[in-house]
Image (cartoon, rainbow, N blue to C red):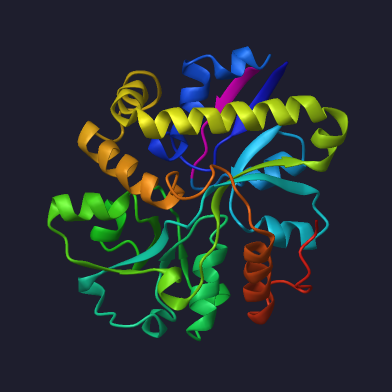
Amino acid sequence: DRVTLQLKWLHQFQFAGYYAALEKGFYREAGLDVQIREGGPNVDAIEDVVTGRADFGVGTSGALIARAQGKEVVVLAAVFQHSPAILLVPRRAAVSSIFALQDRALMDTPGSEDIAAMLKLAGVDYAKMPRVKHNGDPLDLVSGKADAMVAYSTNEPFVLEQLGVPYLAFSPRGSGIDFYSDNLVTSEKQIKTHPQRVAAFRAASLRGWQYALSHKEEIVDLILRRYSQAKNREALLFEANQTEVLVQPGLIELGYQNPARWQAIADTYQSLGMLPEAKVPA
């Protein structure tokens, strides 16, 4: 079966498990011909899945908000047990607290619900913050195009440190907001129409993640050879090691989802007015 996986961001180690599943033949063994489609700053993988433009996607915990809006998205696996999402602010912006970010220019991306929750909790009107186009390049932050940037702890801090640029990083986890991230999602229609295919894709993808985290250098070389050279080997290895910390394969079964954890995420959304109903669907 030919299926499409829509990534949420540009090619990098963030999606290593899917590259490994394709490269090592895990998808083929499961009877699947998988096309991996690159994402980017303007890609909403959840929207692509619910509208049928993709069969599977890598999305955020914003799937709960999508469900509340009547979109039939289903999370198959929580790959990152903790979100790497952070808000980067250069020291030149003279910002010492999250609250001071009100009215500051923000480089934002779709699916930044945990960042939005952190800002709302700090009293910042996230919706009214001026927006600057996000090109995925932290140099835009350095040059002064924006005052703050939605980023991943696995990526952009490495670039800024290599450049010697001083910065602050505000993490939702520091505010008690601890979401799942980079969830493997599909639609209810896919599950009802092709249940065996969905199960096979999930199993092969998690097998790929197990392989990728056990063979980080091999998969970094694969990314450089076949997917992207936007990041060098050192940056990708940094990302790989940071990703393993967030996935926690030695502590938690890959893809594991705790219903109580999802309910806590829903409660956070509801308390901040981002979700009308805090009951998590089964």
- Above/below status of 116 relative to 69: below
Residue furthest out toward the right: 192
Question: In the rendered image, which quarter is residue 200 located in?
Answer: top right
Is residue 36 within the magenta segment? yes
Q: Is residue 141 above or below residue 118?
A: above
Residue appearing at x 45%, y 48% in the figure: 247
As drawn, which residue projects farthest toward the front? 251
Q: Nearer the viewer, residue 206 or 226?
A: 206
- Give the x, y percent position of residue 149: 38, 62
Residue 128 visible: yes
The relative height of residue 129 versus residue 262 in the rendered view (above or below) is below
Task: Report the span colored magenta.
Answer: 32-40
In magenta stretch: residue 2: no
Residue 25, image x and y in percent?
A: 53, 14
Residue name at image x 42 percent, y 52 percent: 246
Q: Which of 172 and 260 is in front in this view?
A: 260
Among the 4 quarters of the image, the one containing residue 152: bottom left
**Viewer can see residue 143:** no
Q: In which quarter of the image is the C terminus?
A: bottom right
Which quadrant holds the N terminus?
A: top right
Q: Which residue lies furthest to the left in this view?
A: 164
Left or right of 163, for residue 52: right
Residue 42 percent across, percent down from the top left: 54, 47
Instruction: Please report the residue visible at 77 percent of the width from the left and 74 percent of the height from the top.
Output: 276
Residue 4: x %, y % from top left: 65, 26
Say above or below: 113 vs 99: above
Left or right side of 211 for 271: right
